[in-house]
Image (cartoon, rainbow, N blue to C red):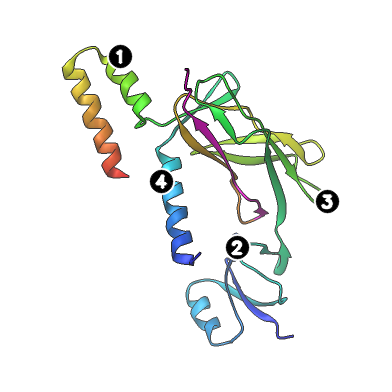
Amino acid sequence: MQPKMIAYDPLTGEIRGICLAPPQVMAWQAQGLNAIDGPDETNLDTHRVAEGQVVAKTVVELTPDKSEIIADGVDQAVVAVTVLGQDPPASLEIMVGNQSETVALAGGAGALSPVSALTPCTLQVAVADSITYRCDPVNIVAVEDVQL
Amino acid sequence: MSSFRAAARQTQAAREQARLSVAKDQSRWVASDPVSPQAVSAALEKAGNWQQGKKILQDIFARLLSN
């Protein structure tokens, strides 16, 4: 099977382009990117480059105990953070809307501070470093407190 | 879904997240949408007079237009 040409940012390891034909390489280099051969399964979303080698991103799972809360400032959701694979980090930066929190991990597991809301809104929780980690963001939807 | 549509949706989601007010209060995150009807009503009620209320409304419309 034909290997792919991988363009990556030499500073961050982020994969910025993948192609099967060599002519693209000069354009990549003109943009300050490095180019290497990579395995066929290489994908922008699932891989990165570390020490000159294409490696799979570490998978992180965000699991809320509930995805919908009442926007009353009291009801809250707790999002569990799990880093899969060997040698998980001791902590992980998680984005909560436009803010961030460093979540301490024990054996790859931890939890974000509880999330509540004062008005109806949709709050997104995601991993801050999307180059190193692969993670589907989760949305916590705060709905109006309707009292009949 | 086309990549263009997906990118547009991502941009819209990012704008919504940037608009939200999110702050830590006693070890938990509290979110609110400053241009939600609930937040607007609360702000106008708190203002208590038309001059302050008018300025609040102008701020809200400016935020909405910038989005």
Q: Is residue B56 left or right of residue A132?
A: left
| Chain letter for the residue marked with disc 3 in the picture | A
Q: Which residue is label 3 attached to?
A: A86
Q: Which residue is label 1 attached to?
A: B46
Q: Residue B15, which numbered label?
A: 4
Callout 1: helix, strand or loop? helix
Examine the image and state in which quarter residue A51 appears.
bottom right
Question: What is the x, y in percent for residue A27?
Answer: 49, 80
Of badges 1 and 2, nearer the viewer stands 1
Residue at image point 78% right, 49% down: A84
Q: Is residue A103 left or right of residue A73?
A: right
Of badges 4 and 2, nearer the viewer stands 4
Give the mark nearer the N terminus: 3 vs 2. Answer: 2
Q: Residues within 10 Å of mark 3 (few under 14, many from 20)?
A: few
Distance Cα–Cα, label 4 vs label 2: 24 Å
**Quadrant including the N terminus of chain A:** bottom right
Q: Is residue A33 left or right of residue A85?
A: left
Residue at image point 34% right, 32% down: B35
Distance Cα–Cα, label 1 vs label 3: 53 Å
Q: Residues within 10 Å of mark 1 (few under 14, many from 20)?
A: few
Callout 4: helix, strand or loop? helix
The amino acid beneath tag 1 is: Lys
Q: Which residue is label 2 attached to?
A: A14
| Chain letter for the residue marked with disc 1 in the picture | B
Q: Is residue B46 left or right of residue B8?
A: left
| Chain letter for the residue marked with disc 4 in the picture | B
Residue at image point 43% right, 53% down: B11
Question: What is the x, y in percent for residue A134?
Answer: 66, 54
Residue at image point 48% right, 60% down: B6
Distance Cα–Cα, label 3 vs label 4: 35 Å
Q: Residues within 10 Å of mark 4 (few under 14, many from 20)?
A: some
